[in-house]
Amino acid sequence: MGQYIIKRLSYILLVFLLLSFLLFMIYHMLPVDKAAEKAREEVIANKTLNYEERYEYWKAEYGLNGTKVERYLRWLGLYPYQNGGYNGLLQGNLGTSTKYGESVIRVIREPMRNTVTINLIAAAAALGITIPLGIFCAVRRGSRRDAFIQVATIIGYSLPAFIIAIVFIWIFAVRLGWFPVSGMQTAGVTFTSSWHRLRDRLYHLALPLIVMTFCSLGGMTRYVRAAMTEALSLDCIRTARAKGLGRRTIVYSHAFRNALIPIVTLVISWLLGIFSGSLMIENIFSLDGIGRVYFEALQNKDNEIVLALQLFYVLIGLVGNLLIDVVYGMVDPRVRVSK
C-alpha cells in the first residue's frame, strides 16, 4: 500500500506540473497585461513619467520579463526575480489580484472557508437523509412508498437548482417570512457577542442550506437505491437469508457493505466538490463563497485568481482519484491497490 501511494503521488506531481504549465501558458496568452495597466495609471497620474520606463519596471516587478518558460518557472518559485529573490508557488505566493490589489490567498481565504462550511453542513444533512432513504426504498422495492419516493426524487432531480431556489424563496421568505432573502448577516448590525453573530449567520444560511440539501436528495437517493438493489440480488444475500439471519443483519452487515463501492465513489466525489462552491446558489442568495469569487474573477479578467483556483481544482481531482482507490481497498478486501 505504501509503495502504491508513493508511486501515485509521483504521478500526481508529474500530471500537476504538466497541467500547470499548460494552464499558465493559456492564461498568459490572453490580452491582459497588468504591467501595462499599472504603467498607464502612473503616467496618467504624473505626466512627467515615461511610459516605456515604467512599463519595463512593472514587468520586472511582476516577473513578466524574460521568456515564457522563465516566467513559468518564476511563477512556480524555481527561477529568481530581477532582485534575485524567489517568490512563487513553492514559497506560498499565488500572485496578486488585479481587482483587489491583495494577495490571492488573502482574497480567497474567507470565501473558501464559507464555501466549505456551508457545503459540509449541506453534505452531512443530505447523506443523513439519502443513505437511509435509499436503503429503505431498496428493501421495500415495488411498494407504494417506494413508488411515491421514486416519483418525488425524479421530480427533484429534474428541476434545475435555480428553480428550486426561487420557489423556496417565494414560499419561506416572501410568503411565510421565516427566512431572509439573501446575505450572510443582518446589514448594519454590530453584535456584542460571538454567539449572537453565529446565530444571525445560521439564520441567514438556513434557507440556502435547505435548498442545497433538497437539490441533492433526488440524485443521491436514486444512486443509493440502485446500489443497494443490486447488492440485495447477490448470491451471498440469498445464502444469508437461507441461513435464517435477521433482516437487519442482512441489510446492514452484508448488503450495505457490498454496495459501498459505488456509494463511496459518489460520497467522496461529492465531498471533494464542496471546494468548488455552488455558483448558482451563492449568486442567488448573495453568499460570499468561492464559486462567486471565481465567477467575478472571470468577469473582471482577474487571471491570477482564476489560475490559482483552476490549479486548486486540478489538484483536488488528482488527489481525489487516489483517495477513492485507497478507500476502495479499505471497504472491499477483494480490491487490491498494491500494484
Image (cartoon, rainbow, N blue to C red):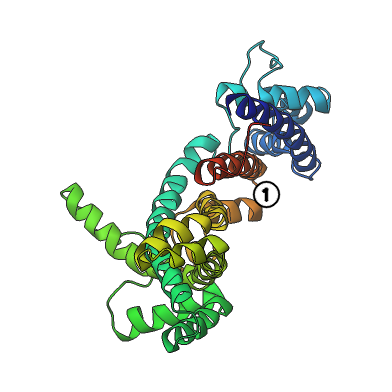
Q: Quadrant of the C terminus?
A: top right
In the image, taking residue 190 as reference, residue 165 lies left or right, namely: right
Front residue (pair 246, 243): 243
Bin the neighbour count of mark 1 within 10 Å (Cα to Cα): few under 14, some 14-19, many 20 and up. some
Q: Is residue 286 above or below residue 164?
A: above
Residue drawn at the location 24% of the way across and 53% of the way down: 198
Question: Whole-percent x and y of residue 259?
Answer: 52, 59
**Left-right relation of 335 to 70:** left
Q: Is residue 10 visible?
A: yes
* Left or right: 119 as drawn, with respect to 296: left
Farthest residue in the front direction?
243
Quarter of the picture containing the N terminus is top right
Residue sitting at 58 percent across and 51 percent down?
294
Examine the image and state in which quarter residue 335 appears: top right
Vertical arrangement, residue 180 with respect to residue 272, above or below: below
| Residue 88 percent coordinates (x, y) | 63, 24
**Which sits in the foreground, 107 or 49?**
107
Q: Amino acid at mark 1?
A: Lys
Q: Foreground residue, 33 or 53?
A: 33
The residue that mark 1 highlights is 301
Picture coordinates of residue 95, whole percent (x, y): 60, 32
- Locate residue 174: give its quadrant: bottom left
Q: Secondary structure at mark 1?
A: loop
Q: Is residue 188 visible?
A: no
